[in-house]
Amino acid sequence: MALWRRFFVSQRGEERPANSPMEYDEKQVGIEVEVAEEPVPEASGIAKIEAVEAVGGRKGRYFLYAGLAMIMMIYELDNSTVGTYRNFASSAFNQLGSLATLNTAASIISAISKPPIAKVSDVLGRGEAYIFTVTCYIVSYTLCASSKTFNMYAGGYVLYSVGQAGTSILNSIIVSDLSSMRSRGFFYNVMYIPFLITPWVSAFIIDSVVNGIGWRWGIGMFAILMPICACWIVITLLFYQRRARQSGLILTERLSVPEFCSRIDLGGVLLLSSGFALVLIPITLAADTPSLWSTPWVDALIAIGGVVLLCLYPYEKYFARHPVVPVRYFRTLSVVVSVALACVDNIGFGCNHTYLYVWSMVSHNFSARDAQFLNYTNSVMQAAAGIATGLLMYRMRTYKWIGVVGAVIRMVGYGVMVRFRTNDSSVAELFIVQLVQGMGSGIIETVLMVAAQIAVSHAELAQVTSLVMLGSYLGNGIGSAIAGAIYTSRLRPRLRLHMGPGADEYEVDKLYKSITGTLPAWGTPARTAVNQAYSDVMGYITIAALAFSAPIIILSIFMPNQKLGDGHNLVQKPPSPEPSSSSSPSPEPEPEPEKPPESGSEATLTPVMDEKRLQRKIEDWLDGHTGDEPDVQ
């Protein structure tokens, strides 16, 4: 039971010396650990996922992989369709100008939801956290599909962002739980393989829905599809957790409400969420006021938000027992650079893509299907480039200079976009630009995620993953805010300029608020004027995105260049063998003949565990080996 006692030991005790048992990596071969401390009766998420592997054996892992594949398929299909429907929903309520505000609010909610959901998954378990996120999905689909006002739709969409953020972080955590740091970049991106297909399928679905049953039914159908696809992984996790509990492998603790709030660091979560909300939401809302940025309440809210964020550091350092943002992360260069890279890279992405869909439909007369193709070309290329980057990292055992190359490619993509955002650009040019941008992002996102995860212990993997994703979503929110500010402040003047002195203000207002049923016929002088106005605004937005690409190169250069080993991370290392030392441990006894592990057997609970045979076969294939090596027991 040594392995399980390690997971239940309190993390708030004395600082342990180097090479203490708590620092050993459970995936290091040949390490037998005995821990003297009394176990804390806590069923952590890490202990539960290890218990699922132990009692389920090979069959349980296959069920887990199948469940992960199912939920990733429906997650990516949802991600490729529901987000697009908001363009039509905003137009239906004559609130297209509020699209950037909605995107910003959703991005902020998504960002600040990840750390607490990661905490919940560590305190209650991965399966229990999935139940919460899927419930948020179902309620949000119902609200959005039945909304009578834009405010009701926006409320449902905000709740949808919680479900989406939670599902995303849980999928990433499980994949990272099961992979070594050398292969993590590859396996992390493999789970996005469905995204190589779903955008193209979803384009036909969206085109059929918006021209047929309507966007409401397009959203409502997921209230049935999501729980059906998610139930597989949830049932698998809960079933094997129950068997592990019956076998005595998981110790259950009844938490009081105050203790539960302390475990998830409710105070830190409130400071983090309210601080960023006070800073970012007013930036977008200010674009709708007559005096724009000179409005006093905007400056006041931003200042208050900054003060709240400054209070987060002392609170986490001196008061939080289980901090949502551990202060030592601020001294870990890999974590700081990774979070900053994720934020800055997604500022450019959010800025460039907020109105890309609308611009392609207006200025290039794309159908809903073709606009969908363009909008997701970047992300599809990002997934493909991420898989290739993971393979390259596996071969080279390093990542820094791969990330620098990705940053340069990303900057080139934005620079070319400034040239090709005109009405005269060909369809091929538009898609090539998105491919180049996606290649750069795929490299950067893979590198920064691995760099952050290997810098912390396995017990903190969920938390650091949530912080990197927090940076990504906050960057996306800032980018949407910038795009929204440019759109709301510049589109009306550009429409008046190109439509001429006699432009009807009512017509200008209609074109600003909605693109459904208000655009002039294609090829007419009026439509040409509208096209030029939208292209001008898109040019301003693209220049802003280009400005944020330079810091990406600088940050990637400052990233540490660690060697990717076969362990789980760089923090947990085995002690160096010293056979000649008198204090060295005695040799291990001769192992017993290999026996197939039975479901629920304690024989599977070695510090090394089973090395995930499926993963090892893939890694052998990547190395070009035949895979005939004996299994590690």
Image (cartoon, grey):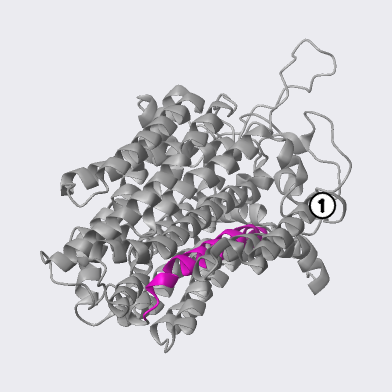
User: Which residue shows up at 37% across the image and 32% down it?
Assistant: 409
Give the camera-side residue of 223 and 567: 223
| Amino acid on which disc 1 is placed | Pro
| Quadrant for the C terminus in the image | top right
At x 71% / y 19%, what residue is drawn?
576
When the figure is inspected, residue 43 is found, relative to residue 408, above or below; the finding is below
Assess whether residue 366 is covered by the magenta stretch: no
- Asked where in the image residue 419 lies, by quadrant, the reply is top left
Q: Residue 68: in sight, yes or no? A: yes
Please give left or right for residue 65 compared with residue 13 in the image: left
Q: Position of residue 170 (x, y in %)?
A: 54, 57
Q: Position of residue 501 (x, y in %)?
A: 26, 68
Q: Is residue 221 above or below residue 424?
A: below
The residue at the far front in this view is 501
Query: Horizontal and vertical percent for residue 140?
Result: 48, 78
- The quarter of the displayed image where residue 454 is located: top right
Looking at the picture, tell me which residue is in the foreground, 161 or 271.
271
Q: Nearer the viewer, residue 249 or 504?
A: 504
Read off the magenta span: 94-121
- The picture places residue 540, in percent across and down from the top left corner, at 38, 50
Left or right: residue 369 compared with residue 550: left
User: Residue placed farthest to the bottom in the image?
Assistant: 148
Residue 123 seen in render: no
- The residue that label 1 is drawn on is 39
Residue 111 within the magenta-colored segment of the rendering: yes
Residue at horizontal 39 percent and vertical 83 percent from the top: 145
